């Protein structure tokens, strides 16, 4: 391959994330159902197309040099959906993990789960634990999938753990600070959240990363999740690059 060819084959927006000072982005992937409804298709087709958008977005994030990408895949409230939709979503998840494990390994992607995923079907839990372990030493992008995740549930679990530590005398209740809570959250080993994206035009957090989003920049797009791609991600990153983060200072 000539030098020119090598250049043209380089991924679009390579290195964009560090160039924007962005380490950790999260996405509320919303709008699969509306994407399908607009085409008179069953919701399942929207979810299936949503998985394709996950693949495209993970590849783009990796090419852009993002350290951590957190995707809201199934909330602790999504159990309220009809049983067949829940089962479709779990089936797609199972298929995604099985089909993409080799790509994660080949591309140095580390997989991490946040949320109370241990209550999912035992075969799924086993599959997840296996791939998490097999990618644990990968040093590229960390792909964080939020499964049966709710920020309030995460904070309840953290509070229980801290209360138990206090009862054992390991921590003094009066000395508990934000850092103790941080350390008990599912995200404790991730860089601070810089950017939170929500697709489909909705402007709410739906119980996602409430603590971690304290000073994150928010980005809302009307694009429905199945239509989201590398260019959409680059647009969000470019918007982030124009923000002035103050953290309460001036
Ligand atoms: C997001 O799309 C996928 C999940 C929540 C799992 P939705 O299924 O919420 O799609 P809309 O919001 O009904 O369009
Ligand atoms: C948030 O989307 C959850 C995920 C994207 C997994 P929802 O579609 O469930 O949120 P609401 O119900 O519109 O707030
Ligand atoms: Mg929705």
Image (spheres, helix red, strand yellow):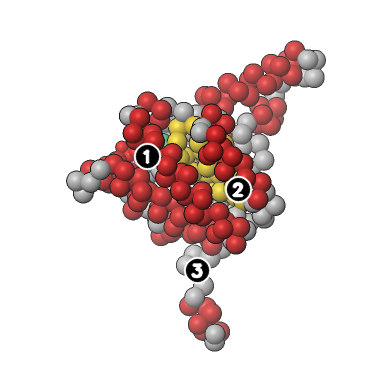
Q: Secondary structure at mark 2?
A: helix
Mark-to-mark CA distance, 1 and 3: 33 Å
Q: How many marks?
A: 3
Q: As drawn, is 87 to the left or to the right of 22?
A: left
Is 144 placed above or below 7 here?
above
Q: Residue at x 40, y 30 (%)?
A: 78
Q: Quadrant of residue 122?
A: top right
Q: State yes or no: Cβ of the residue under disc 3 lies below 8 Å from any atom of ligand 2.
A: no
On the image, numbered disc 3 is attached to which residue?
A: 11
Q: Residue at x 50, y 36 (%)?
A: 147
Ligand 2 shows up in the quarter that is: top left
Q: State yes or no: Cβ of the residue under disc 2 lies below 8 Å from any atom of ligand 2.
A: no
Mark-to-mark CA distance, 2 and 1: 21 Å
Number of other residues with Cα within 10 Å of mark 3, as a class: few under 14, some 14 to 19, many 20 or more: some
User: Which is nearer the N-term, disc 3 or disc 2?
Assistant: 3
On the image, numbered disc 1 is attached to which residue?
A: 88
On the image, numbered disc 2 is attached to which residue?
A: 131
Most foreground residue, 126 or 131: 126
Is 193 placed above or below 20 here?
above
Most foreground residue, 132 or 126: 126
Q: Residue at x 67, y 21 (%)?
A: 161
């Amino acid at each position: 391959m000539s030098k020119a060819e090598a250049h043209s084959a380089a991924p679009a927006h390579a290195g964009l994330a560090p160039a924007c000072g962005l380490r950790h982005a999260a996405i509320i992937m919303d709008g699969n159902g509306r994407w399908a409804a607009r085409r008179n298709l069953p919701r399942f087709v929207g979810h299936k197309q949503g998985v394709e958008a996950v693949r495209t977005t993970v590849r783009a994030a990796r090419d852009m040099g993002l350290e951590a990408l957190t995707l809201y895949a199934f909330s602790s409230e999504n159990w309220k959906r009809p049983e067949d939709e829940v089962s479709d979503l779990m089936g797609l998840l199972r298929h995604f993990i099985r089909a993409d494990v080799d790509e994660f390994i080949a591309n140095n992607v580390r997989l991490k789960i946040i949320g109370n995923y241990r209550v999912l079907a035992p075969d799924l839990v086993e599959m997840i634990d296996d791939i998490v372990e097999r990618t644990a030493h990968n040093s590229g992008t960390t792909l964080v999938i939020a499964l049966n995740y709710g920020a309030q549930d995460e904070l309840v679990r953290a509070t229980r753990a801290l209360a138990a530590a206090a009862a054992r005398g390991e921590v003094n209740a009066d000395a508990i600070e934000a850092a103790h809570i941080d350390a008990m959250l599912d995200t404790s080993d991730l860089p601070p959240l810089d950017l939170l994206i929500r697709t489909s035009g909705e402007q709410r957090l739906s119980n996602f990363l409430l603590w971690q989003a304290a000073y994150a920049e928010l980005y809302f797009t009307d694009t429905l999740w199945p239509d989201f791609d590398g260019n959409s991600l680059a647009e969000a990153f470019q918007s982030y690059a124009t923000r002035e983060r103050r953290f309460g200072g001036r």
